[in-house]
Image: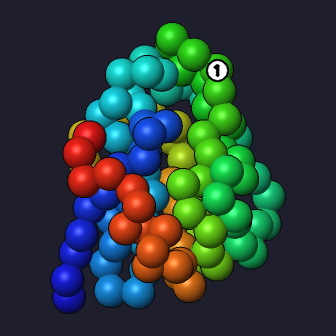
């Protein structure tokens, strides 16, 4: 299955894997936030639109909301983040992902940057 990685301006990575798009916290996002200590996942979102809030984050350097770089249907949220927000501090993309989307416009993904 073909994989392709892109980055948003607000510190997120997007991994396209087949028809699904997994979104997580990039190294830039980790640097901007500092050590993540608390996250608040939105309740029961079936879909997200570009610039919708993906989650609220409290880090050592900032308290902010991370906004979606894409519009799509939610496949799954990384529910473990609620009890283990420190997973967002990991360099491992199997740990620091936030949610997975499908039915994303390919053009919207292509507009994201290939550079961190």
Q: Is residue 35 left or right of residue 115?
A: right
Depth check, front residue: 104 or 53: 104
Q: Is residue 78 above or below residue 65?
A: below
Q: Residue at x 44, y 39 (%)?
A: 9
- Identify the coloring: rainbow
Q: Residue at x 41, y 61 (%)?
A: 111
Answer with the quarter of the image where residue 44 lies: bottom right
Q: Is residue 83 visible?
A: no
Q: Is residue 38 left or right of residue 115?
A: right
- Quadrant, the C terminus: top left
Q: Is residue 78 above or below residue 86?
A: below
- On the image, the x and y values in percent for residue 83 come to 58, 43
Depth check, front residue: 81 or 12: 12
Residue corresponding to mark 1: 63
Q: Residue at x 54, y 47 (%)?
A: 81
* Mark 1 nearby-residue class (10 Å; few <14, some 14–19, many ≥20): some
């Amino acid at each position: 299955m073909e994989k392709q990685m892109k980055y948003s301006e607000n510190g997120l990575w997007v991994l396209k894997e087949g028809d699904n798009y997994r979104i997580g916290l990039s190294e830039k996002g980790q640097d901007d936030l500092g050590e993540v200590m608390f996250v608040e996942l939105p309740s029961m979102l079936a879909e997200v639109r570009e610039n919708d809030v993906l989650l609220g984050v409290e880090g050592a350097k900032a308290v902010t909301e991370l906004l979606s770089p894409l519009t799509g249907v939610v496949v799954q949220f990384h529910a473990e983040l609620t009890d283990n927000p420190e997973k967002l501090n990991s360099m491992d993309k199997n740990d620091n992902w936030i949610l997975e989307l499908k039915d994303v416009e390919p053009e919207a993904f292509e507009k994201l940057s290939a550079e961190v």
